[in-house]
Amino acid sequence: MNLADEYRGRRVLITGGLGFLGSNLAHDLVELGADVVILDALLPLYGGNEYNVDGIRDRVTVEIGDVCDKPTVDRLVAGCDHVFHFAAQVSYIDAIDDPWWDMKLHCTALLNVLEACREHAPEAKIVFSSSRMVLGKLDYTPVDTKHPTLPLSLYGAHKLTCEKYCAVYHRTYGLPTVVLRISNPYGPRQQMKHSKYSILGWFMRQAMEGNDITVFGEGAQIRDYVYVDDLVSLFLRAGASDRAVGEVFNAGSGVASRFVDAVEAVVDIVGKGGVIHKPWPEDYERIETGGFVADMSREKDVLGYEPHVGLREGLERMYDFYATRSQHYW
Amino acid sequence: MNLADEYRGRRVLITGGLGFLGSNLAHDLVELGADVVILDALLPLYGGNEYNVDGIRDRVTVEIGDVCDKPTVDRLVAGCDHVFHFAAQVSYIDAIDDPWWDMKLHCTALLNVLEACREHAPEAKIVFSSSRMVLGKLDYTPVDTKHPTLPLSLYGAHKLTCEKYCAVYHRTYGLPTVVLRISNPYGPRQQMKHSKYSILGWFMRQAMEGNDITVFGEGAQIRDYVYVDDLVSLFLRAGASDRAVGEVFNAGSGVASRFVDAVEAVVDIVGKGGVIHKPWPEDYERIETGGFVADMSREKDVLGYEPHVGLREGLERMYDFYATRSQHYW
C-alpha cells in the first residue's frame, strides 16, 4: 500500500486533531500531501494543544469548535474523503464523576459525525479510535478482536457503544467505517499537564522534574505500549484499505512489556527521578483488567501493519521531543 | 419463591409504569401488597396510558414526569426497595430518525436511575428491561445469553449500552442490577395506536376493525411470543432473587412460533379481517435478524420461571381484554 497515493490531494477531517494522536496523524497526512482539516475544542485538561501543529500550522485548516455541535460537523464533513474521529472524553476517572458528560462526548459526538457523513459525505472513510477498555477483565492474552466485551468502566461502555454505532451505520447505510482499539499509546505531543491519562507522559514529566514515580504493587502488570508513529501508520492503513471497511482491529504493538520496566526505562533515559512502590488503592484494583497484550497478527495480514519502534527507542524519541519543549506541555 | 413475602410492604418504583409492561407489573405488585410508585411521561405515541392503571388507580402513586430529569428521579428513587426501569424510546424506526433522542431516552434515563440509586438507594434492586434486539443476526437458536451482541439498529445498540451500564454499576458500586432481554411480548394494555411497535397488538386492532393484515413474505420467520403475565412473573422473580444480581437473563417463552401462525390465530380469534402476503421491503430485510427463540432453561433453573400461557390462549385473553375497551386504546 502506497500511502501517498491514497492520501495525496484527499480532504481529511481529524476531530480532536490538536490532541496527541490526531496531531501526530495530521503531521503524517501533511507529509503525504493531504488537505487536512482539524476540528478541536481545546477543552481545558484535555490533550488539545495548538503547539501540536507547530511546523505544519500553515498547511492545515484548524477550526476551534465543538464536535457535539451538529451544524459545525455538517459543514466540516461535507466534501471529505476521510474522517478520523479522535475527539472524545479522555479520562475513565472523569467518566465516573460525570457519566452524562462522557456519554455526550462519546455518543453524541460520534452520532454527529456518522449522521453528517450519511447526509453530506456517504463515501468518506470513517476511522474511529476505540480503546482496549471495551474488553473488561481478560479471558486470555494475546487479545484478539473476538474477545468478549464486558467493560468495567463507563468510559469503556461508551467506547463500545461507539463501536456498535460504527457497525450499525456500516450495515444500515453502507458507510465505510473502521474501528481501531488502541492499547497504550505514547510518544511526542502527548499531554503532560496531569496524571489522569497518558501515564507514561506523566511519568516522564515526573522524572524530568526529578520527582519519584509511584508504581502500585510490583508493577508487574503486562501492557502493550505502542509508539505513536506506529499507531499513526496503522490508522493511515486502516483509513485507506477497502479490506478494513466494517471491521474492528486492534491498535497496539503486539509486544508485552511489564509496566515497571517501562517506568524504569523512563527514569534511566531521563537520568533523573526514581521509582517507589506503593500498595494498590482500592478503586484502582476494581478496574484493573489484568495483563494486556494485543494480538496484532490480523492487522499484519489484512493491513500490512508492521510496528518499527520498540519501547526503549520510543521512549528515547519521546524524551528527545520533550527535552526542549516542556514549556509547551506543562 | 413466595412473591408476596418478597414484595409485601416494599416500595417499588416503576418507570414507564403507565405503559404496557410497567402497568401489568403494577397490577401484580399491588396484588402482592407492594407500595407502588409510577413515573411516566405519557409521551404521545408511546405506550403510556392512564387507563392502564384502571382498577388500581387509588392504590398506586402516579407521577407524570420525565425520567431524563435527574431531580425527579432522585426524589422518587429515595426510599425504594426495587426499581423496575421500563421508560425508554420504544421504536427502532424512530431511533433511525432521531438517534440522539433514542440515546437520551435510553442512556441518559438509565444513568439517572443508576446514579440516583447509587446516591439515595444503594440497596434497591434495579431491573432493566432490555431487548433481543441487542443480538443482531443470530448464529444459533435457541439463543442463550452468551450469544454475541452485534445489534443491527441504534435501538439495539442503546439497549446494549444500558446492559453494560448495569454491569458497570454492579461491579463498580455493588448496585444489585438485573437485566432481562425481552423477546416479543403481547397481551392486555399494549398500545394499539400505530404500527411502529407492538406488532401483534396492531394486527389485532386491524382484525377487530375488519381490515386485512399484511404479512411480508411467507411469514415463516420464527418468533418467541411471550404473554405479558408470564413476563411479569419473570420480572418479579428477577427483582426478588439474590441469584439474579449482576446477571443477564432472557425474557421469552422458550416456544418457537411462526409469525404467520400468530397472525392467523389473531384473525381466527377475532373472527374478522384477513391475511395478505407482500414482498419484504428493503429496509425491513436489513434489520431482520433471522428466526428467534429464547433458550429459557437458565431462567427456569435460576429463577424458577415457568411460563403458563400458550400463544393461542394468550391471544384469546388479549382479545377478551380489548373487545370491550377499544375506546381506551385507539
Image: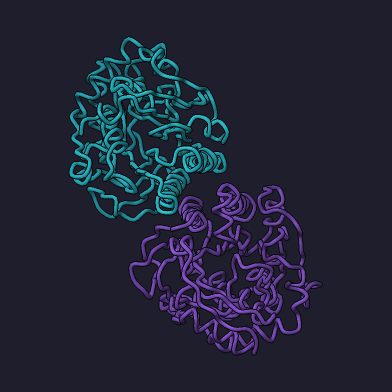
Chain colours: A cyan, B purple
Q: Position of residue B104 (x, y in %)?
A: 60, 49
User: Quarter of the image holding residue A196?
Assistant: top left
Q: Residue at x 33, y 20 (%)?
A: A30
Nearer to me, A303 or A19: A303
Counting labels gives 0
Q: Residue at x 46, y 43 (%)?
A: A155
Is A138 left or right of B239, judged from the image as shown?
Answer: left
Nearer to me, B208 or A160: B208
Q: Is residue A176 above or below residue A262?
A: below
Q: Position of residue A293 (x, y in %)?
A: 25, 43
Residue A145 visible in the picture: yes
Nearer to me, A7 or B28: A7
Q: Position of residue A287 (x, y in %)?
A: 40, 46
Q: Is residue A294 above or below residue A21?
A: below
Nearer to me, A33 or A212: A33
Q: Residue at x 41, y 47 (%)?
A: A166
User: Quarter of the image holding residue A8?
Assistant: top left
Is A181 left or right of A115, judged from the image as shown?
Answer: left
Q: Residue at x 48, y 26 (%)?
A: A40
Q: Is residue A121 above or below residue A204?
A: below
In the picture, which quadrant includes the C terminus of chain B? Answer: bottom right
In the picture, which quadrant includes the N terminus of chain B? Answer: bottom right
Q: Position of residue A307 (x, y in %)?
A: 20, 33
Residue B174 visible in the picture: no
